[in-house]
Amino acid sequence: MRWPWQKTKNEQRSITSGFTAEIIAARESYISGRRGIGELTASVQTCVSLWECGLSIAAVRGTRFLTAFDLSLMGRSLALRGEAVFFIASDRLIPCADWDLKTRDGEPVAYRLSISEAGGAVSRTALAAEVLHVRIGADVAAPWAGQAPLRRASITAGMLHAIEDALRDIYENAPIGSQIVPFPESPDTDKEFLSRGFKGKHGRVLLRESVNVSAAGGATPQVDWKPSDLSPDLSRSMTTESLKASREAIYSCFGVLPSFVNASATGPVVREGQRHLAQWTLAPIAKLISEEASLKLGGDIRLDVMQPLQAYDAGGRARAFQSIIRGLSEARKNGIEDSEIANALKLVDWASE
C-alpha cells in the first residue's frame, strides 16, 4: 500500500550552499560577532582585556559562585556579544557557548543551552530561574537580548577594517622602496645580468634605457642618472588621521578614554582613564550582574569594582578626609549635635547608607 503523496523514486537534494548552510553561517556570525572583523583588531582586544581584568578583580560579597574566572568570562562575553549566559549548577556556574530562549511578556522563561565540552558540545534545557543571563545595551524591540558595543557602532568598526584592509593591500602590492634607475642603451643580457646583482638588496631596482642621448650615439649625460622613487605617498590620503580617529571612536564605545592609551600619557591621565572606565562602564555592568545574581542565586549580592581597581584620586580623597575631620572638629567645638552633623552630611551626599 502506498500513500497518495509518496513518490515513486528517491528524492535528490542539492549539496551546494542552501538553507542549512545559510543558517549555520548566520549562527556563526552571531557567535563570533556582528561582522567578525572588528573583533580581530588590537584596539578591540585591548578594550576587551580591560573589561576582563576589571571585572575579574571585583570584590564580591554575598555569594561564592561568582569567582574571578567566571567574572573574566562574563566580561569577555559582554564585550564581544553583549550578553553572557551561565547555567547554575549545584556548586558552580557553567558557561554556555550558545543558547536559545523562549519569552513571555518580554522576559525569558526557558532556555535551550549549549555547553562546550572537550569532545564537543552538549545540549541542556533549563528554566529561567536556573540560568544567570546578563545583558547590556538591550533594545526595546528585544529586551531579552543584549548588544555588544561594536554592534552599536558598526560603522566605526567597518571603517577601521576598511582602512586596515587598504593598508594591507598597499604594503602587499605597492612597490614600496622600489626605484627606477636610468641606464644607457645596452643589450638585454647585460641589463639582466646587472639587475641580478641587486638581489637581496632592500627594495627593488628597475632598469630602463636612457632617453637622453646624442644623435651620434655618444655617452649619456650625467643629468639623466637620477633614480625615481616608486613608494606611494600615504600622507596625502590622511590614512594615519583616519586610522587614529577610528581607533579613538572604538575606545570611546567601550568606555575607554582615548588619552588612556596615548603613548605620551602621564600618571594623572592614566588614573583618570581608570576612574572613567570603572565608574561609567564597569560599575553599571557590575550593578547589572549583582541584580541578576541576587535574583537567581538568592541573597544580597554586591560587586564593587571601584575599590579593587583603586579608581580614585588618592590625593583628593586624602584632602577631602582632612577637610571632613577639620569640619567635624570645629562643629564639636561649637556645640553642634550629631544629628545636625548627619543632616549636613546628607545635603552633600556623604551620609552612610
Image (cartoon, grey):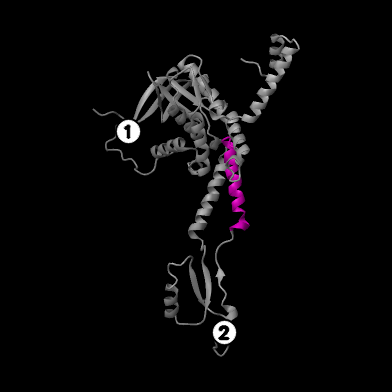
Q: Which residues are magenta?
A: 234-256
Q: Is residue 236 magenta?
A: yes
Q: Residues within 10 Å of mark 1 (few under 14, many from 20)?
A: few
Q: Nearer the viewer, residue 75 or 36?
A: 75
Q: Nearer the viewer, residue 152 or 69?
A: 69
Q: Is residue 17 left or right of residue 232?
A: left
* Residue where numbered disc 2 is placed: 213
User: Identity of the amino acid at label 2?
Assistant: Val
The answer to whether any part of residue 44 appears in the image is: yes
| Residue 181 position within the rendered picture, expressed as x and y whole percent measured from the top left | 53, 74
**Among all residues in the image, which is located at the extreme front?**
333
Q: Secondary structure at mark 2?
A: loop
Question: Would you place residue 336 above or below residue 156 in this image?
Answer: above
* Residue where numbered disc 1 is placed: 118
User: Identity of the amino acid at label 1?
Assistant: Ala
Instruction: Check the picture and name the quadrant holding the C terminus.
Output: top right
Q: Quadrant of residue 248?
A: top right
Q: Secondary structure at mark 1?
A: loop
| Residue 70 position within the rendered picture, expressed as x and y whole percent measured from the top left | 44, 27
The answer to whether any part of residue 107 appears in the image is: no
Instruction: Check the picture and name the quadrant holding the N terminus.
Output: top left
**Among all residues in the image, which is located at the extreme right?**
334
**Among all residues in the image, which is located at the extreme left?**
1
**Among all residues in the image, which is located at the extreme bottom?**
216
| Residue 18 position within the rendered picture, expressed as x and y whole percent measured from the top left | 39, 40
Q: Is residue 342 left or right of residue 117?
A: right
